[in-house]
Amino acid sequence: MEHLTPLKIAGVTGGKYIGTDESKNAVIRGAVRDNRDVTPGSLFICIRGARVDGHSFANNAYDSGASCCLAEQHIPDAKGPYVLVDSTLAALKQIAAYYRSLFDIPVIGITGSVGKTTAKELVAAVLSAKYDVLKTQMNLNNEIGVPLTLLALEEKHGAAVIEMGIRDFGDLSILAEMVRPDIFIITKIGYSHLLELVDLNGVLRAKTEAFAYMKPDGIAILNGDDDLLKDYDPGMRKITFGQNEYNDFRSSDVRTEGTESVKFDIMTGNSKLPVSLAAYGSHLPVLAPAAAAAGKLLGLSDEEISRGFTSFSTVDGRANVIRTDKLTLIDDCYNANPNSVKEALISLSALPGRRVAILGDMINLGEFSEQLHREIGMFAAQCGIDSLVCHGEKALYIHEGYKEAGGTSVRYYPNRQELMTDFAGLIKKGDAVLVKASRGMHFEELLPVILGGSPGHNLN
């Protein structure tokens, strides 16, 4: 296939190549924005951030083996070639869109208010039974992460699974124009980014922008348990998934074994596929049928799909289970919105022993924030959560909702240091403890303290 070179990048972006004739046709393999991630052949993207200007690290990138840099300004005493453009971010998107067009492989795009990363891991696990799969790494699901992911495509890849996250109207259009998915999965229309998207209908509009960038023979895989997606017409073939009987792919007979595994059957037509996932969470039987649907569409056999599921594992910060001889800790700190918190509470409620939920603010819920936080507290009480611990300005309403619904064991901490000091009295030996809040609350900082890292902390 055709390879990227500095000269090709200049042509695609309308930029100016600056360098020697010898370097203009150097093969470029992958792109990075952090010079510490450079490997031989990389394209280093000089991006100006709020605190750091990538242009200052261009020569470090050359020292690490970068073939070329993409820059918005001249690089003094450059040790290698670079392409000068008006905007490195805009140029990065142009390069990614062009590079994606060189690959004739199935590309699966995934979005949703909750469950994007889990769905991405499930789909990639299934497809890995037949293909060498490129998948989104870490949280590279935005306007910088998506093009960097696309530029990691290699000739060996037989399929790509791209997670696509948004905050506002138009964001998904920008991503989809690069990704051009053949199959597009939407996991859920939920309460997220309401400051920008206003309400659930706004979320639906934003999450469905991708369909305008798909071919007529593209396929939508939508959560049929979701009230808005169930009746949504994407203008192309639609397959539904979930747990309700009317879905094209659905899970049934769900059996959980504590935090060790969840087992269920995936039904489609008259076919039944037994599935066993070595993971934890009530969301898994909802999302796994989407992965099975993608596998079927791409020609995998039942045996391959089943084998693919066995390779699935969770990502740190998302229902990640940490077991010690004193407690079971559910690290779900990566992010939170009302839908994901409710799923986490349902999962926690199914565990044996005393169930403790440590919950913090859910950010960016706009005018619905107080109501939605209060509803989470009420839901926790209705789920039978034995003890609730709340921290954060908005978490006060979670605390109040829990009490309003009849919950009795609840503590609210406006001060984080006081909370961390109090853990010894809040958590007992044998507890199952959920820790969840929006990413901006930095609840991951609580984990080592809960596990015994604070002075005076000793589980009874």
Image (cartoon, rainbow, N blue to C red):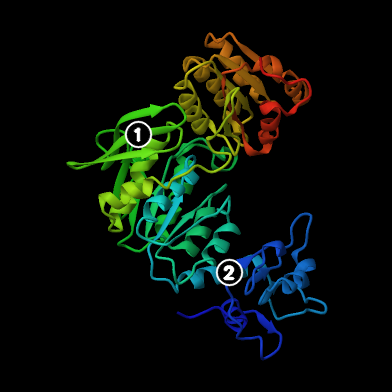
Q: Pointer 1 and pointer 2: residues touching (CB < 8 Å)? A: no
| Residue for point 57% across, 73% down | 29
| 452 relative to 125 in the view: left or right | right
| Residue for point 65% across, 79% down | 15
Q: Nearer the viewer, residue 459 or 266?
A: 459
| 302 relative to 79 in the view: left or right | left
The percent coordinates of residue 163 (x first, y second) are: 49, 52
The percent coordinates of residue 335 (x first, y second) are: 59, 38
State the mark number for residue 263: 1
Q: Is residue 53 visible?
A: yes
Assess disc 2: are there few (<14), some (14-19) or many (≥20) residues with their C-alpha within 10 Å of its C-alpha: many
**139, above or below 130, in the image:** above
How many numbered marks, from 0 up? 2
Q: Is residue 85 visible?
A: no
**Given this view, does label 1 or label 2 mark the residue nearer the observer?**
1
Query: Which quadrant holds the N terminus?
Result: bottom left
Sequence order check, earlier mark of 1 and 2: 2
| 96 relative to 65 in the view: left or right | left
Query: Which quadrant holds the C terminus?
Result: top right
**297, above or below 455, in the image:** below
Task: Report helix, strand or loop for mark 1.
Answer: strand
In this view, the residue farthest toward the right is 76
The percent coordinates of residue 364 (x first, y second) are: 61, 37
Task: Report helix, strand or loop for mark 2.
Answer: loop
Q: Nearer the viewer, residue 257 or 297?
A: 257
Callout 2 amino acid: Gly
Q: Quadrant of residue 279?
A: top left
Which residue lies under the disc numbered 2?
30
